[in-house]
Image (tube, rainbow, N blue to C red):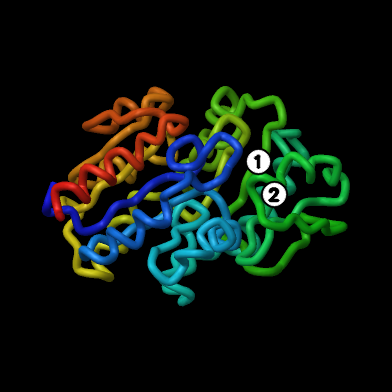
Amino acid sequence: MTDIQLIASDMDHTLLEEDGSVPAGFFDRVHALRKHGVGFAAVSGRSIATLQGLFAPVRDDIILVGDNGAVIERGKRRVYTNAIPTATHQHLTAYTHRQRAGVPILSGVDAGYIDARDADHIKQLGNFFNEVRIVSHLEQFAEDVTKFTAYYPDGDAYEQVEAEFNRPFGADLSVTVGGVHFVDVMNPDVDKGAAIRQLGKAYGIPTARMMAFGDGANDVPMLQEVGYSYHVLNALPPAATAARYTTASNQRHGVLRIIDKVLADII
């Protein structure tokens, strides 16, 4: 694995601990990778602002990919934003409220936004957004939005996604499941695989020399794109099928174990 130039990893249930924290020793590994010319990209359905907080100690040394690829930063510089047209996210919000297809959330660059009638869900969303702001009429929200999310408090996103979002919107928008509680909708050219291709072009790195880790359905495009793809042992079937290799679960720090092997091969 001495040819690896970029390592990309999903966050929740992949790199992060189950409480959402960064595992001990990860920042030291980022510095070691950087020293030997290997980049690291945190690739997540989470907002870019949430990733900024998680990786503040190494923010100058890694790439942050938020909202499933709709926002990309390198260091403290925003290099890519793919905002959803206002009419589109307003329509999705109105549809979701009308159909009761989950709880609609809009991801802005700096915060998540939720309708006042859904404010009782804010506490549960605290682990996924650095800040959730309440607005009185979410259907009329007109600021930049990079991702629409339907939140399913009962954890049945996988069961609901086909009928409630793929069938009515899948032909025109990018629809994915970001864990059992979230269906994410972005512009049609946005997913984690597209983000990986964009990073390759921007930094001159062939995808064959990239490594990626994932556990869920929204990781599949990324896993299919890279030369070295791993699913953690706790992965759901879509990611497990897409990946070429397996590592230990997030609770047993499977991502860190493979990073250590990459470093051992390089040094």
Q: Residue at x 67, y 38 (%)?
A: 151
Residue 156, percent from left and from top: 62, 24
The number of numbered discs placed on residues in the rendered structure image is: 2
In the image, taking residue 27 as reference, residue 120 lies left or right, namely: right
Which is nearer the eye, 255 or 125? 255
Q: Nearer the viewer, residue 67 or 171?
A: 67
Which residue does the numbered mark 2 point to in the structure image? Answer: 105
The residue most toward the bottom is: 77
Q: Residue at x 79, y 43 (%)?
A: 123
Q: Find residue 123 and name its label.
A: none
Inter-mark Cα distance, 1 to 2? 6 Å
Q: Which residue is mark 1?
A: 150
Q: Tell me if residue 181 comes above or below residue 156 in the rendering.
A: below
Which secondary structure lies at badge 2? strand
Tell me residue 213's x, y (percent): 34, 41
Question: Please, what secondary structure does the residue beneath circle 1 have?
Answer: strand
Q: Identify the mark nearer the N-term, 1 or 2.
A: 2
- Residue 45, given in percent of the width and then of the height, sits at 52, 48
Amino acid marked by disc 2: Ile
